[in-house]
Amino acid sequence: MQKALRDKKAICIFILPALIWFVVIAVLPVFQSFGYTFVKWNGITKAEFTGISNYIEVFQKSIFWKAALNSLLVALASVFIQLPISMLLALILNYGVRGETVYRTILFIPVVISSTIIAQLWMKIYHPNYGILNTLLKAAGLESWQQQWLSNYKIALVAVLIPMIWQYIGYHMLLFYSAAKSISSEITDAARIDGANRWQISFKIIIPLIAPMIETSVIFAVIGSLKSFDVVYMLTGGGPLDATQMPTLLMYTEAFSASKYGTASVMAIFVVVECLIFTLLIQKAFKRYRRE
C-alpha cells in the first residue's frame, strides 16, 4: 500500500477517471454557461452574439439586486444565527448528556429529509387557517399576532429564513461535534484541573482548536445560502411582491419561463463568482485569525 502511494504514476491512474468526470460534469458546464452570457438564445433557434448586452440588461434590473441582497441576508442569518445554535448544541452534546446518541440523531433528521418535504411541512405550519403557528397563537390568546406568514411581504423573508436555518442546524452541529470529540481529553482535563469551567474550556480551548471546521461550516453555510432555491421556490416562489426573490429563482424564471438563456447564464455566473469571492474572503479571514 505504501509503495503504491509513493508511485506517482499509480496515483495519477487512479485519480484520472474521477478528474475527467469532474471536469465533464462541473468545469465544462461553467465555461459553457459563461459562453452563453454573450449570446441571445432561446434554446431552440440559432444563438446570436450580442456582446455584453446580457450583462447590461441583468445589472440594470432592480429586482436582480434585490434578489442578491436577499441572498446576502440569508447568508448572514446562516452564519450568525444557524452556526451559533449548532455550536451550542455541539458543545452541550460534547460534554455528555443522557441519550446523547438519540439527540444527535434527532437533530440530524431534518438534514436527510427532502427539501420539498421540508417546504410542505412548513407550509402547513404557516397556513393562515389551520396552521400550527396561528392555532397556538389563538390558543394563547394572541390573536393579534396571527399573520398571513407567507403572504405578508414585510415578514415573508423571515418566514422563509426559519425553515432554511432549521433544516441544516443538525448538519453543522454534527461537524462541530465530531471536531470537538477529536480533541484529546488530556487537554481539557488539564484545563479543568487548573480551575477552568466549561464555558472557559469551550471558548478558550475547544472553539480555537476546531477553527478549521468552523471555517468549513462558514463556507458551506454562505455558499448554500447564496445558491438557495428549493425551499424558497416551494414556499413562496419569490413572492409576495418579490420579497423573497433570489438570484437562482430569477435564473430559473429567465431560462425556463422566458426562454432567455443568455441573461439566465449571466445570473448563474454571478452566483458562481459570488461564491468564489466569499470563499476566498472567509479563508483569508480565518488565516489571519489563526495567525493571531
Image (cartoon, grey):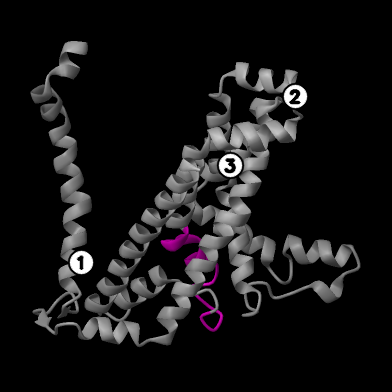
Asked if residue 239 lies in the magenta stretch, the reply is yes
In front of the other: 275 or 141 = 275
Residue 70 vertical position relative to residue 5 in the rendered view, above or below: below
Looking at the image, residue 226 sits to the left or right of residue 45; the answer is right
Q: Dot 3 surroundings within 10 Å: few (below 14), some, or many (20 or more)?
A: many
Determine the secondary structure under disc 2. loop
Q: Are marks 3 and 1 in contact (CB under 8 Å)?
A: no
Which residue is the extreme one toward the right? Answer: 141
Residue 97 vertical position relative to residue 217 in the rendered view, above or below: above
Q: Amino acid at mark 1?
A: Ser
Q: According to the image, label 2 marks what residue?
A: 98
Q: According to the image, label 1 marks what residue?
A: 33
Q: Amino acid at mark 2?
A: Arg
Rounded to the nearest whole Å, what is the CA distance between mark 3 and mark 1? 34 Å
User: Residue 229: x percent and y percent?
Assistant: 44, 63
Q: Are marks 2 and 3 in contact (CB under 8 Å)?
A: no
Determine the secondary structure under disc 1. helix
Mark 2 or 3 closer to N-term? 2
Looking at the image, residue 49 sits to the left or right of residue 87; the answer is left
Mark 3 or 1 closer to N-term? 1
Q: Dot 1 surroundings within 10 Å: few (below 14), some, or many (20 or more)?
A: some
Asked if residue 111 lies in the magenta stretch, the reply is no
Which residue is the extreme one toward the front? Answer: 292
Rounded to the nearest whole Å, what is the CA distance between mark 1 and mark 2? 52 Å
Q: Residue at x 85, y 73 (%)?
A: 143
Which image quadrant is residue 277 in?
bottom left
Q: Which range of residues does the magenta coloring cover?
A: 225-242
Q: Residue at x 21, y 60 (%)?
A: 30
Q: Which mark is residue 170?
A: 3
Q: Amino acid at mark 3?
A: Gly
User: Residue 153: x percent and y percent?
Assistant: 62, 80
